[in-house]
Every structure is written in structure tokens, then in C-alpha cells.
Amino acid sequence: MSAPVAVRPVESRQDFRAFFEFPWTLYRDDPNWVPPLLSMRRDLLDKRKNPAWAEYMEGEYFAAWRGDQIVGTIVAFINHRHNQFHQEHIGWFGMFEVYDDQEAASALLDTAADWVRARGYDAIRGPQTFTTHEDCGILVDGFVRPVLLMPYNFPYYGRLVEGAGFVKAQDLYSFYLSRQGALEHKTGDRLARLTQAVMKRNKITVRQIDRRNLKAEFQLFKDIYNAAWDRNWGFVPMTPRELDALVHSLGQFFDPDLAFFAEVEGDPAGFILAIPDFNQVLHRVYPRPGVPEWWSLLRALWYWKVRPVIDTARIPLMGVKEPYRKTGVAAVLYYYVLEALMSTPHILHSDSGWILESNENMVSIALSFGSTIYKTHRIYEKRFQR
């Protein structure tokens, strides 16, 4: 008979090491999982280095144990900026990883819910690690290798979360388009004429990012980003420190040929950015505990630059200021970045995501370009009775 599940806070160095390394044990035999660089995971979990933890979040890490074996992890936290911005009174869970074990999953989720409820909040939502700018949702459809900066999990996760009394709050869609699909759909020919007509009618101009003046361009990106996402479900404006961290993170994979700004009569109206899918490199390198990171980085350089394996790009960021959302700016930007991707010889596939299911305009635009929804991530919620 197996030992009962015990959920405990992560307190000791040994506890943290077990929490930190658990995904490598859990996904050891899964061919789709892509491990992160160890340094990136440490920075994410470090409450002093991660800007969200340092500036406006509070929370606690937990691990589930059967005897001396770790069987799952979770974090319960309060995002004070979210509550202030959306006038809600909720908590969150994230870093949810577990074996196919309803007892362990329920114990973890109940512990997180109890932690939030004990502080007087009305509900718990998640998973989110730890903001809308990072990993969001449980993968419920499309169990293939994740692209860069997107979460992945086993198919049983949704069943376990729902078994613990959580219900759907929102779905997040990812869209796929191949070079071959674009050619068959005649995306370029059909939409080039439409794009030019929209640009002329609404006085829209598009330009690539100025690689000679990147500091100012990144500042413009920051200014547009918070304004463009202002009314999106669950979005919380980034702090300056968070924006700097995002620019630094994306800057590691940045390709100036795949970044565009749109202007309407000279006023910055929106932006779009595509990045090479570095997960294809990490999938080959498989960074892991016990292997020096310098060795992982050296192997990554081989698969990135010397014998490149990347044939996919992700469009992780796009934003249009509210006054220009009905002028066709979003469709124009989407056209420009897809044309750039299709013109890049080694890029054969593109991922656009995520897009909220409730963002009907962007969902319609993505579908009109010949893309298909190939992955769905789900945010869950449990409300507390008083």
C-alpha cells in the first residue's frame, strides 16, 4: 500500500532542490517536453531576481510527497497588481506539475486554494507562472512539442484539475501556419491587395525596427506594449523592471528582420514581433541538473549557428493601441510579419499565440490568413463559498 500524500511548504535547501528538479523526473520519458536552461529556471523562481516577486507578489511554494518521494509541485500566490488593475480579489496558482495521481493533484490544488482563502480572497485562478507575460494555462489540446516560452504538460492535467473542482475561466489559442499551407491558401497573393488597400484608406505605414537605434526602438516597444494590451482579459501593465526583463529575455533570440512598427499618420499605433523557436535547439541540447550550463550553451551554439536546426518561428507579441483597433492595423502587421517569415528560407512553420478565445477580432484575422488552431491552453478557476 502506498504512503499517503503529504503537502509541505518548500523551506529547506533540499526541499527547493527537489522542487526545482522535479520536471526532469516527471517528463523524463516524454519526447515532447523541452527543458529550460537551469539559469532561466533559477531566475524565475528566485523571489529576489524575478521582478514580479520582488515588486508586487507574495506567495509560497509547496511540494507533495509520498513518503520520501516528491510527486508534485505548486505555488500559491497573490498578484496585488492584478487585483488593483482589474478590481478583483483573487489569488493564483502556478508551477503545477504532478504525476497522474488525483490524490496528489487534489492535495496540491486544495493546499493552494486554502492558502489563498485563508487570506480572505474570493477565488483562485491558474495556472500562471507567474503573470500573463509568462507561462499561462493547462494544455488541453495539441500535445506536441511546445514552442519557445509556452508551457507543456501531459494530457491528464486537465482531468486532474477539473477533478479538484476547478472550472474553465478562459481558453488561449495558438495558431499554426506552414509555408506550404500559405502557398496553397494563396495567403500572399490574396492578402497583399487587401493590405495595400487598407493601408492607403487608413493612412497606415509599416516599417521594420531600426537596428541602428535599438535602445530607442525598444523604448517605443515598451510604450506601445502596455497601452496596446490595456483592456485584454487578465492583462496587467508591466512595471519598468518587468519590461526591461522582457526585452532582455527576447533580445537573446531577437531578429530585427522579424519586428515591425505600424504608424497611422505618423503616430505609433502598433507593433509585432516574431522570434526563432529556440526550443528546437533546447530540445536537442536537453539542459539538465548535473550538466554544467557552459556545456549546454556550447552545444546550443552548435545547433543554433553552426548546424542550425530551427525551422519554426513564433509570433509571441503583437499589440495595437485601442484607437486604431478598427482601422486594420492588426491585419496589416500580421501580413507583414508572415510575409517576412515566408521570405526567410529556413523558416517553414510559424506559431501565432497565444490569442484569447474572447479576442474574436484577432482570432478571425489569424484564421483568415490560413492559420489553424492547433493548441489550446486553459485557465481554470475555483470560487470560494463564504
Image (cartoon, grey):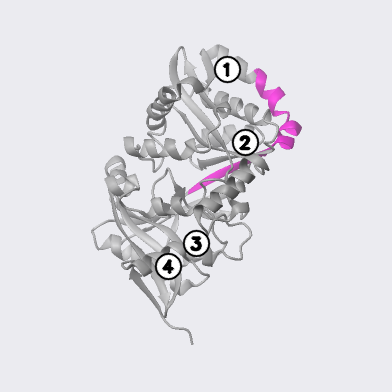
Which residue is denoted by mark 2 in the rendering?
367
Which residue is denoted by mark 3 in the rendering?
289
Q: Nearer the viewer, residue 11 or 288?
A: 288
Dot placed on the residue nearer the N-terminal end, 1 or 4: 4
Q: Which mark is residue 198?
A: 1
| Highlighted range, magenta | 171-193
Q: Residue at x 67, y 36 (%)?
A: 347
For the stretch drawn in magenta, the main secondary structure is: helix
Quadrant containing the C terminus is bottom left
Q: Position of residue 294 (x, y in %)?
A: 51, 51
Q: Is residue 176 magenta?
A: yes
Dot placed on the residue nearer the N-terminal end, 3 or 1: 1
Q: CA distance from mark 4 to mark 3?
A: 11 Å
Dividing the picture into quarters, in which one does residue 342 lie? Answer: top right
Q: Is residue 289 left or right of residue 232?
A: right
Q: Amino acid at mark 4?
A: Ala
Q: Position of residue 279 (x, y in %)?
A: 58, 47
Q: Secondary structure at mark 1?
A: helix
Q: Which label lies toward us, 1 or 4?
A: 4
Q: Amino acid at mark 3?
A: Pro
Q: CA distance from mark 1 to mark 4?
A: 55 Å
Q: CA distance from mark 1 to mark 2?
A: 18 Å
Q: Position of residue 153 (x, y in %)?
A: 54, 58
Q: Amino acid at mark 2?
A: Leu
Q: Secondary structure at mark 4?
A: helix
